Amino acid sequence: GDSVTQMEGPVTLSEEAFLTINCTYTATGYPSLFWYVQYPGEGLQLLLKATKADDKGSNKGFEATYRKETTSFHLEKGSVQVSDSAVYFCALMSTNAGKSTFGDGTTLTVKP
Amino acid sequence: GAVVSQHPSRVICKSGTSVKIECRSLDFQATTMFWYRQFPKQSLMLMATSNEGSKATYEQGVEKDKFLINHASLTLSTLTVTSAHPEDSSFYICSARSATARGVEQYFGPGTRLTVT
């Protein structure tokens, strides 16, 4: 079945540091890939997505590129802020079933 | 973007009682909705897929008689936790699938925090 493997956390960075959170997936067919962010006590917010190979999703300074050859969708940001502290989930959605499979989540803490 | 709401956002109930959680798609019709459960500091676990007008499809290990799902309309799905116990305390998140010309999208509700005392 489908699966998503995320870089284990927690990740602690200083403000303005470079962020990478690795994500790899296993799926049949050509899934869509997503990054979601969850702030404490809240639901999931879509951060960015990519629907086909070589697509780059971007939002609020975050980027991720759909790499079919390496089955990866790594999240990057050039300069993190304290307000980026949250839990980040990588996910895929199979086009057939339309349901999502999530990674375990990576907790990011950014210190001033 | 599309909006999915959940009600209530928080609920505290006594052991042995039942609790109903509503999930609504506010500005689109959703033939399919999903119910997830999230334990503290863990990922989302899919509980069931809810299809409008038909029975829900439950994931392996999820008790269908305990977690009753009803999807009576294209904008509303409900999850009822029957005879709740403290181990049912969790964060429940629903999502709704929207199929448009741009493709299939999934939108998440804000979640419901259930505490069973």
Image (cartoon, coloured by chain):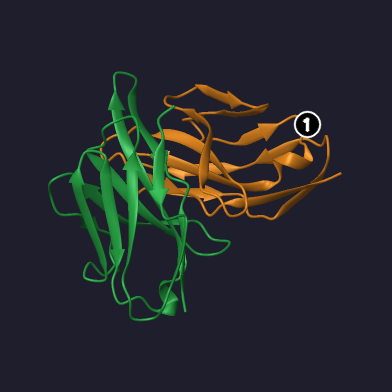
Residue at (54%, 35%) from the top-left corner?
A73
Query: Three-letter amino acid code at disc 1?
Result: Ser
Q: Position of residue A6 (x, y in %)?
A: 56, 49
- Tag count: 1
Position of residue A77 relative to residue B92, above or below, is above
**Chain for mark 1?**
A
Left or right of A25 in this view: B30: left
Left or right of A31 in this view: A43: right
Residue at (24%, 58%) from the top-left corner?
B69
Visible residue check, residue A72: no
Q: Residue furthest top?
A: B101
Disc 1 packing (10 Å; few <14; some 14–19; many ≥20): some
Left or right of B34 in this view: A39: right
In the figure, the shade used to draw chain A is orange
**Nearest the eye: A112 or B82:** B82
Which chain, by letter, is green? B
Q: Of helix, strand and loop, which one carries label 1? A: loop
Residue at (55%, 64%) from the top-left corner?
B40
Q: Residue furthest right?
A: A112
**Nearest the eye: B117 or B68:** B117
Q: Which residue is mark 1?
A: A79
Quadrant showing the N terminus of chain B: top left
Q: Position of residue B45 (x, y in %)?
A: 41, 58
Residue at (30%, 39%) from the top-left corner?
A98
Q: Quadrant of residue B81?
A: bottom left
Q: Position of residue A28 (x, y in %)?
A: 33, 40
Q: Position of residue A48 (x, y in %)?
A: 53, 30
